Image (cartoon, rainbow, N blue to C red):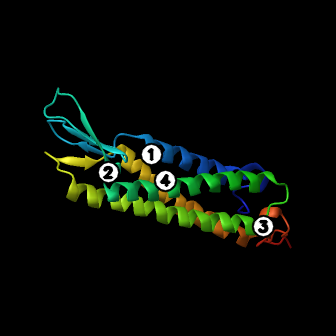
């Protein structure tokens, strides 16, 4: 990609690989139970994107309530899930685009645009969740948004960054495909 950096033939799978890592992070965020956890003793609260669990005391039994009973819970889950599905579609399209010998750069720019749309949906879900959760769910002690919520934000940030890469990649089409002769700044006498 760059004259002295990445060679296209060896590094053509880096962007689809990064999208695959984003998909894995998205799966962890969707399935993780650590969106919100109690930070200090007593550890009596934990929540995921789908449910909120609490217990009366440290060693007690967990009582879980579905967040799908709240309109904001359905909205947060739906928007994050739409962003994740768009990310999976972009991953599949990137595999197809980079598997073709003659790379279609307009196709790649479309993947970048779709990644920006996925990032918007993911960020909407990631903002709705903490705002409404903290105002409508009763919490005791000090609570923190935890590891699974962090994986959700990591996925959204990866969608934005990879969107820029996919959109800017066609600008260097000739350099990537080797159609430009190298220019040398030093000429021998």
Ranked by sequence position, the earlier of labels 2 and 1 is 1
Ranked by sequence position, the earlier of labels 3 and 1 is 1
The residue beneath circle 4 is 81
For mark 4, give the secondary structure.
helix
Residue at (17% x, 50% y) in the render: 138
In terms of depth relative to the viewer, which is nearer, 127 or 55? 55
Cα separation, mark 4 vs mark 1, equals 8 Å
**Contact between labelled residues 2 and 4, with CB atoms less than 8 Å apart:** no
Cα separation, mark 2 vs mark 3, equals 54 Å
Mark 3 Cα within 10 Å, few/some/many (few <14, many 20+)?
Answer: some
Mark 1 Cα within 10 Å, few/some/many (few <14, many 20+)?
Answer: many
The circle on residue 175 is 3
The residue beneath circle 1 is 30
For mark 2, give the secondary structure.
helix
x then y, percent, for residue 169 = 69, 66
Ranked by sequence position, the earlier of labels 2 and 3 is 2
Ranked by sequence position, the earlier of labels 4 and 3 is 4
The residue beneath circle 2 is 69
Cα separation, mark 3 vs mark 1, equals 39 Å
Residue at (18% x, 35% y) in the render: 55
Residue at (35% x, 39% y) in the render: 33
């Amino acid at each position: 990609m760059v004259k002295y950096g990445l060679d296209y033939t060896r590094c053509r799978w880096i962007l689809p690989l990064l999208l695959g890592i984003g998909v894995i992070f998205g799966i962890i965020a969707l399935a993780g139970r650590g969106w919100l956890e109690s930070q200090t003793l007593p550890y009596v609260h934990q929540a995921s994107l789908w449910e909120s669990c609490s217990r009366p005391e440290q060693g007690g039994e967990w009582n879980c309530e579905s967040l799908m009973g709240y309109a904001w819970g359905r909205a947060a889950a739906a928007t994050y899930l739409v962003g994740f599905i768009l990310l999976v579609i972009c991953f599949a399209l990137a595999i197809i685009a980079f598997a073709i010998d003659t790379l279609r750069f307009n196709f790649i720019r479309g993947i970048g645009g779709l990644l920006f749309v996925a990032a918007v949906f993911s960020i909407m879900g990631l903002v709705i969740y903490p705002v409404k959760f903290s105002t409508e769910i009763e919490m005791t002690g000090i609570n923190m948004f935890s590891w699974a919520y962090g994986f959700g934000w990591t996925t959204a940030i990866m969608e934005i960054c990879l969107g820029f890469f996919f959109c800017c990649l066609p600008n260097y089409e000739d350099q990537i495909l080797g159609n430009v002769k190298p220019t040398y700044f030093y000429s021998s006498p």
